Amino acid sequence: MKPSSLLILVFLSQATAFDVIREAFKLIDENVNPCDNFYRHACPLRSIKGRYIEDAYGSKLFKLKAKTAEAVWNNLAIQETFERAHYKEFPSLHIFIAKLFQKQCETEHVTTEEKGKFLELIQETWFNHKNSECVYSECLGALASDRNCTRASELLESKLYYRPWDEFTTTLRVFFIQTQNNLEGINAILDDDLREGVSNVKNIVETMKKKLLTWIQQTPWVINNEAIESIMAEAEQVHHYDNFAKTFRYNLNLLLKLEQSYLKCLRDLDDTEKFRVFCMLAATNNIDFKKISMDFFTFYNAVNGHPNLYFSHLFYDMAKNVESPAALLGSVGFIAGHELSHSLIEDANQPELIPYFSNDSMQCIQNQYQTTCDSFKETSCGANDNQIDENGSDILGIQLAYSLFEDIYSERKKDEYIQLRYNNTITNEQMFFYSLAFISCKGEPGTQSEMDPHSPWNIRINAVVQHPGFRDAFNCDVNSPMVQSFNDQCVIFGEKAPLTRK
Ligand SMILES: [Zn+2]
């Protein structure tokens, strides 16, 4: 290709794509030396209100939401009933239903047959079986013939048991959120045609997995504890989940079936708030809430639901539009490495997925986080036991991402990628580390909340850049705070990992 046509291509791709990492260079504080406090050099305190990525994608996300306002999954009659119901004014569930029956029973011209139908619905909803299949005290049909409505309703109440509304409403809320997130997430991928980004993320995960499998086989503590097979098997199971057709069909079907059975139930009953609430209860009866998982979503997050890994559509957007592979590996690559690592990092005292984990590695990880906390604490931080999984996944995650970066760049690590103002140049290797800080950039001081297994971002980033590549990339002085806060590099898997004999 001639240089001139290459130029046109670059120009075209820059004109159409939004490169969130390139944009982020405006955040940098040139007055803070990267070797003094890398995170706050790349992401100054109060430079931004919330989180950089959410802010940068704010208007795109807003437009996306506006576009799906009319979508069928956002306009269900059953959800309207769910949102509008005055649960606080209702008695507990079983009394609510008994009183509703009494009301129907006392209504003029209501036939025994109509009462029987309602009782059948109650029976189905409450005991999960039909009239003909009911068992002993769970058979409600006979109540339809009782002319004394108060007595029949009291008897009905005694057959039902206490259930709080909260239990039901919380589950249903989660159901709506998860199904709609799936549909919105997939819609975002298709609407922006991010399929190329999806396959890029999948490639990153698969390449990392191969790398990890070779590392595992070389790891002394794995070999010495005869754990190669089980740990390899664990790693082999992990996959990037990308079956949007399956998830789309499944979730849309669920919502539409729910809507149908809600409307069918209402056909036989009065269209009042209380009967609508009852039909909502009846419609949800057949949903197996445990079968719903959130595979796709538009908010900024990624999840290891072992063996599947799930990513926000924002990562797919980045994987399509971030131009430099170094920047992509430092951002999406780090997150992918982190999620993959979740399947293989354990608290050595109580492993969950793999049978054995190195105590030395665990101590190394926690020591690094504590040292980083001691050096860079803002509001609060500290290496607690509940953070081992997250901290370790950060450290293994960056090692995987950096290793892929080295494979691609080898001799070109120090080549200039872009030139910033004041003639500062950014090399490919620096780009890798910068993008790590950009995607996690938060303007508020780092604060540790006790229940959160994640360390604050200022600690996470300054801890994971305890990597020989970082010192090298920024030529950090031995006495600089970043180098001073580096402990020994924690190699978890690979030849140089700890021995830990039995
Ligand atoms: Zn995590």
Image (cartoon, grey):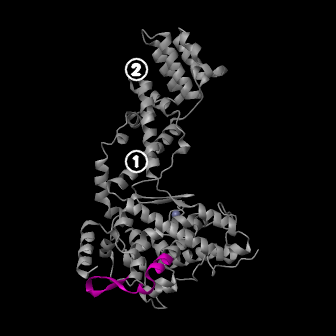
**Quadrant of the drawing holding the N terminus:** bottom left
Whether residue 275 appears in this view of the structure is: no
Q: Is residue 126 magenta?
A: no
Whether residue 287 appears in this view of the structure is: yes
Residue named by callout 2: 270
Q: Quadrant of residue 58?
A: bottom left
Look at the picture and state if 318 lies above or below 257. below
Q: What stretch of residues is rendered in magenta?
A: 402-427
Which residue appears at 57% of the width and 14% of the height? Answer: 143
Q: Earlier in the sequence, mark 2 or mark 1?
A: 1
Q: Amino acid at mark 1?
A: Leu
User: Is residue 156 found left or right of 424 in the rendered image?
Assistant: right
Q: Is residue 420 magenta?
A: yes
**Cβ of disc 2 within 8 Å of ligand 1?**
no
Cα–Cα gap, marks 2 and 1: 32 Å
Residue 496 position within the rendered picture, expressed as x and y whole percent measured from the top left: 63, 82
Instruction: Identify the secondary structure beneath mark 1.
Output: helix
Which residue appears at 39% of the width and 52% of the height? Answer: 186
Mark number for residue 183?
A: 1
Q: Nearer the viewer, residue 463 or 186?
A: 186
Q: Nearer the viewer, residue 159 or 206?
A: 206
Callout 2 crowding tier (Cα within 10 Å): few <14, some 14–19, many ≥20 = few
Instruction: Identify the secondary structure beneath mark 2.
Output: loop
Q: Nearer the viewer, residue 469 or 190?
A: 190
